[in-house]
Amino acid sequence: MKFFFPSVLITLLGVASIAPLYHAETKAAVTFSQQEVQQESFIVLAAPRGQTAYNLLILEQISNRRLCWRVRPDRLQTVDPLLRNFNFTGICGRSTDSNAFSIRMAGEDLALNYTLRLVQREGVVVLVGTPADRTLPEITLGRTRGITRDFMKIDLEPGWRLTRRLFQGRPLGHIYLTNNTDLRTYAAEQADIVVTRPSPTPSPLPTRPGTPPLNPPPHPTPEHPPQTPPPPAKP
């Protein structure tokens, strides 16, 4: 008869309870598909949090009974989230965390591999996919047109769009940020984009007054006539 120490027994029970759950998630992930949506019915936002941070927010206009947001006519595309002013149930959809949105590339759901987050880089807020496995590349999905402590519209990068998650043909509330290109190809294409800048024209070296030129003309020219001594003065 074998006896298990309590710690070993707890470990075995933990593995036994996690395994079916992991299997169920893997099986469910295989059955997920996507449904195209009208892009103008959605907006992707950077919502200010605290003093410097931003949260990702996706709004959907479900019904036309009332407007859910308004984009202001300014350079930064700041946004009024109008749904804060009324009961938006059945009118507006709101996705605020990783349970409500994820990345999908070439038909593959990357929810278990990538986390969506907003970071500030070079004067804008950038939407990136950060991998759990550091050997995988970071993905850039969109960016704002500047930085301000207000709600800002995020412009998605070329090739990206929103779709809806389907489970066995049934639409869910989960939203995908979708690209038809697979991860490996997309990462390679991004790595090939190199920003080239023209080399600056070197400025001439400064010279002191009375300093002869570095390369004087070897022969007299119209610009440099021969120097002749003046005639002697008459007595």
Image (cartoon, helix red, strand yellow):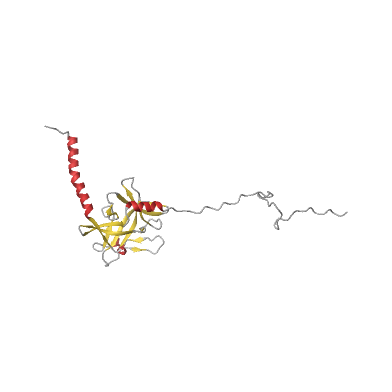
Please identify the residue farthest to the right as the structure is shown: 235
Please identify the residue farthest to the bottom as the structure is shown: 65
* Residue at 18 percent of width and 46 percent of height: 20
**Is any part of residue 185 visible from this angle?**
yes
220 left or right, relative to 177: right
Above-or-below relation of 71 to 203: below
**Is any part of residue 68 visible from this angle?**
no
Q: Quadrant of the C terminus?
A: bottom right
Q: Nearer the viewer, residue 55 or 141?
A: 141
Q: How many marks?
A: 0
Q: Position of residue 68 (x, y in %)?
A: 30, 63
50 left or right, relative to 227: left
Q: Nearer the viewer, residue 194 or 69?
A: 194
Q: Position of residue 121 (x, y in %)?
A: 40, 52
Please identify the residue farthest to the front as the structure is shown: 219
67 left or right, relative to 122: left
Q: Quadrant of residue 10?
A: top left
Q: Position of residue 85 (x, y in %)?
A: 29, 62
Q: Quadrant of the N terminus?
A: top left
Above-or-below relation of 64 to 100: below
Q: Quadrant of residue 83?
A: bottom left
Above-or-below relation of 65 to 131: below
